[in-house]
C-alpha cells in the first residue's frame, strides 16, 4: 500500500514537471495569451460556458492550468484547448507565466503563496458564488485583481465603497452576470421537460447542502436532522461541501454511520454532478452560496438553518452594506433556529405547498441581483476576447 502510494506520487510529479516545461516553452507563447487557472475539477463548471462561447466565436487558444489530475478539461475535444496539470509547482508556474489575461476564481491573490507575475498584463477574477464580497471573504480578497466580472449591482457597490474607504486604486468592474447560474437554469428547464415526459414519482426530494467551517449543519445538528427526516416520506440527499470532506473526515464517517439504517437518506458522493440540484424540491442549507444558485437557477425555495454566521472578514460591518446573502435569506426561502429544528417537517410541507409563490418572488429578485440574465457567458467571453486582441 505504501509503495503503491509512493509510485503514484512520483508519477504525478513527473507528469506535473512535464506539463510545466510544456506550458512555459517559448514556442507556446501564443497559446498562453488567454489562461484560466482552476484549483480543482469542480471549478471547471464556472468556466465551462465562457470557454465554449470563446471557442464558438473565435480561433483563440485556451490555456487551462488545473491542480487536479482528473479535471474534465483533459477530455475536451477542441484542438484549441490546451490543458496542463500543475499542483505542487503552481507557485513557480504562475510566477513565470506570460499571458495577456489570466482568469481565476481564487481569492487573496498576492497575499498568500500565489503572487502576481510581472509578465501577465491583466488578472481577471470570475466569481464562483453570487454572495457579497465583504462577509465570507477576507477584506483584501480582491485587492490585487485588475478586473472583476461582477455578478450583480451588489458587487459593484461593495467593491467601489471598499476602494474609497481604504484608498485603493479603482479596478475595472464589468457588469457580467453569472455564467454558472445560467447553465443551472438551462439544465433545469431541460430536466423538467424530460421528467414531464416520464411517469413521475410523487415522492419529494430534499437536498441538504451546507457550507464548510466549524459551525455548520454537518457539525451542529445533522444527527437531529437525520432523525427527523428519517420519519418522513421524503427522499433526502446530503451533499457535503468539498472543503468539508477534505477537512472533516471523521464527521463524514459519522454521517455515513447515521444514514446506514435509514432507507430514505443517503450521502451524495459525486460532487461533479448537478443532478441533485435539479431533483431537489427544497434545499436545506445554512450559509452556503449554493442557496442562491439553487433558488435563482431552479426557482425553488430554500430552508435555511440559522447556524452561526460564517465570517472571514471581522470588520465587514464597516462597509455599512448588508451582505446580499443576509438580505435575501427570507426572500428566497424561510429560516429556522437550530433550537426549533423540530419544526422542520412542517416547514418543508409549507414550502412545498407554496412553490409557485416563491418562484415568482425569486424571479423578481433575480432581475435585481443578476446582470444581463442569460447573456453572462457571452458577455464574459467577449470581454476576454477583446482584451486578448488588444494585448
Image (cartoon, grey):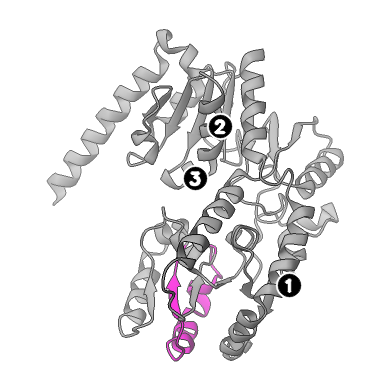
Left or right, 61 with respect to 305, comes to: left
x and y percentages locating residue 42 in the rendered image: 45, 47
Which quadrant holds residue 122?
top right
Distance from disc 1 to disc 3, alpha carbons, whole Å, reads 28 Å
The stretch of residues the image draws in magenta is 211-240
Instruction: Work out whether residue 245 or residue 385 is closer to the camera in this orientation and state it.
Output: 385
Q: Secondary structure at mark 3?
A: helix
Is residue 121 among the parts visible in the rendering?
A: no
Q: Is the residue 196 above or below the residue 105 in the image?
A: below
Please report contact status of discs 2 and 1: CB closer than 8 Å, yes or no.
Answer: no
Distance from disc 2 to disc 1, alpha carbons, whole Å, reads 35 Å
- At a point 42% along the width and 55% down the height, the residue shown is 273
Residue underneath mark 3: 45
Q: Is the residue 312 above or below the residue 39 in the image?
A: below
Is residue 187 among the parts visible in the rendering?
A: yes
Q: Secondary structure at mark 2?
A: helix
Residue 233 part of the magenta-drawn span:
yes
Left or right, 256 with respect to 101, comes to: left
- At a point 46% along the width and 89% down the height, the residue shown is 232
Q: How many marks?
A: 3
The label nearer to you, 2 versus 1, is 2
Q: Which mark is residue 53?
A: 2
Quarter of the image containing the C terminus? top right
Residue underneath mark 1: 330
Residue 65 part of the magenta-drawn span:
no
x and y percentages locating residue 259 in the rendered image: 35, 80
Q: Secondary structure at mark 1?
A: loop
Please report contact status of discs 1 and 3: CB closer than 8 Å, yes or no.
Answer: no
x and y percentages locating residue 153 in the rendered image: 79, 47
Instruction: Work out whether residue 329 or residue 192 is closer to the camera in this orientation and state it.
Output: 192
Left or right, 3 with respect to 288, comes to: left
Amino acid at each position: 500500500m505504501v509503495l503503491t502510494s509512493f509510485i503514484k506520487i512520483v508519477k504525478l510529479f513527473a507528469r506535473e514537471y512535464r506539463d510545466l516545461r510544456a506550458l512555459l516553452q517559448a514556442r507556446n507563447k501564443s497559446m498562453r495569451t488567454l489562461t484560466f487557472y482552476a484549483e480543482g475539477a469542480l471549478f471547471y463548471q464556472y468556466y465551462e460556458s465562457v470557454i465554449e462561447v470563446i471557442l464558438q466565436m473565435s480561433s483563440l487558444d485556451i490555456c487551462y492550468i488545473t491542480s487536479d489530475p482528473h479535471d474534465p478539461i483533459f477530455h475536451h475535444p477542441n484542438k484549441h484547448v490546451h490543458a496542463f496539470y500543475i499542483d505542487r509547482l503552481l507557485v513557480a508556474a504562475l510566477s513565470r507565466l506570460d499571458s495577456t489575461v489570466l482568469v481565476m476564481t481564487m481569492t487573496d491573490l498576492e497575499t498568500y503563496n500565489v503572487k502576481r507575475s510581472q509578465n501577465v498584463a491583466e488578472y481577471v477574477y470570475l466569481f464562483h458564488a453570487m454572495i457579497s464580497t465583504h462577509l465570507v471573504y477576507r477584506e483584501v480578497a480582491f485587492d490585487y485583481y485588475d478586473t472583476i466580472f461582477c455578478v450583480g449591482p451588489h458587487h459593484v457597490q461593495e467593491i467601489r465603497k471598499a476602494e474609497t474607504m481604504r484608498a485603493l486604486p479603482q479596478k475595472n468592474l464589468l457588469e457580467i452576470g453569472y455564467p454558472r447560474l445560467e447553465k443551472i437554469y438551462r439544465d433545469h428547464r431541460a430536466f423538467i421537460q424530460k421528467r414531464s415526459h416520464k411517469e413521475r414519482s410523487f415522492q419529494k426530494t430534499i437536498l441538504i447542502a451546507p457550507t464548510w467551517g466549524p459551525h455548520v449543519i454537518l457539525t451542529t445538528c445533522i444527527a437531529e436532522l437525520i432523525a427527523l427526516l428519517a420519519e418522513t416520506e421524503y427522499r433526502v440527499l446530503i451533499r457535503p461541501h468539498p472543503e468539508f470532506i477534505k477537512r472533516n473526515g471523521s464527521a463524514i464517517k459519522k454521517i455515513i454511520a447515521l444514514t446506514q439504517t435509514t432507507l430514505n437518506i443517503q450521502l451524495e458522493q459525486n460532487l461533479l454532478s448537478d443532478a441533485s440540484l435539479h431533483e431537489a424540491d427544497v434545499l436545506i442549507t445554512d450559509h452556503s452560496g449554493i442557496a442562491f444558485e439553487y433558488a435563482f437557477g431552479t426557482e425553488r425555495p430554500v430552508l435555511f438553518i440559522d447556524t452561526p454566521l460564517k465570517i472571514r472578514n471581522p470588520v465587514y460591518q464597516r462597509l455599512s452594506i448588508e451582505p446580499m446573502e443576509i438580505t435575501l435569506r427570507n426572500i428566497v426561502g424561510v429560516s429556522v433556529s437550530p433550537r426549533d429544528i423540530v419544526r422542520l417537517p412542517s416547514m418543508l410541507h409549507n414550502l412545498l405547498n407554496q412553490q409557485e409563490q416563491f418562484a415568482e418572488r425569486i424571479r423578481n429578485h433575480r432581475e435585481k441581483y443578476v446582470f444581463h440574465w442569460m447573456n453572462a457567458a457571452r458577455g464574459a467571453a467577449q470581454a476576454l476576447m477583446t482584451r486578448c486582441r488588444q494585448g
